[in-house]
Image (spheres, rainbow, N blue to C red):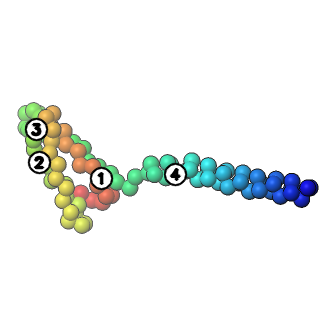
């Protein structure tokens, strides 16, 4: 009987450490997933008088890889090129 009780306590201790390890791991996953390796460019397109220009296509070129991302300015002249790899543009 004493051996059985000690065995049960040992199993609970094992389960406790498994659950604790899982909890620590799951708490760390959102922090890791929140980190991003991408950047972006945002700007406003205006003419020489300072008036905003809507519908202008902006071409963002990665100089070292030659890849091109095209975006269009919105109704208030703002463009946003998102998810760009860190590099020279």
The label nearer to you, 1 versus 4, is 4
Provide residue 11's location: percent of width, then percent of height.
Answer: 77, 56
Of the numbered discs 1 and 3, the one sitting upstream in the chain is: 3
Label 1, secondary structure: give it: strand
Which residue is tagged 2?
A: 57
Q: Distance between the residues labelled 4 and 3?
A: 41 Å
Q: How far apart are marks 2 and 4 (CA)?
A: 38 Å
The residue depicted at 72 percent of the width and 51 percent of the height is 16
Q: How many marks?
A: 4
Of the numbered discs 1 and 4, the one sitting upstream in the chain is: 4
Query: Do the residues bearing badges 4 and 3 touch, measured as CB atoms within 8 Å?
Result: no
Picture disc at residue 83: 1
Query: Do the residues bearing badges 3 and 2 touch, measured as CB atoms within 8 Å?
Result: no
Provide residue 10's location: percent of width, then percent of height.
Answer: 80, 56
The label nearer to you, 2 versus 4, is 4
Picture disc at residue 29: 4
Other residues around mark 3 within 10 Å, as few (<14) / some (14–19) / many (≥20)? some
Q: Distance between the residues labelled 1 and 3?
A: 22 Å
Which residue is tagged 3?
A: 54
Q: How far apart are marks 1 and 2 (CA)?
A: 17 Å
Label 4, secondary structure: give it: helix
Query: Do the residues bearing badges 2 and 4 touch, measured as CB atoms within 8 Å?
Result: no
Of the numbered discs 2 and 4, the one sitting upstream in the chain is: 4
Other residues around mark 1 within 10 Å, as few (<14) / some (14–19) / many (≥20)? few
């Amino acid at each position: 009987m004493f051996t059985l009780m000690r065995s049960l306590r040992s199993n609970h201790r094992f389960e406790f450490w498994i659950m604790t390890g899982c909890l620590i791991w799951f708490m760390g996953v959102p922090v890791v997933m929140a980190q991003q390796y991408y950047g972006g460019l945002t700007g406003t397109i205006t003419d020489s008088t300072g008036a905003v220009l809507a519908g202008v296509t902006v071409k963002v070129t990665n100089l070292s890889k030659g890849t091109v991302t095209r975006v269009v300015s919105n109704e208030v002249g703002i463009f946003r090129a998102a998810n760009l790899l860190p590099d020279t543009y």
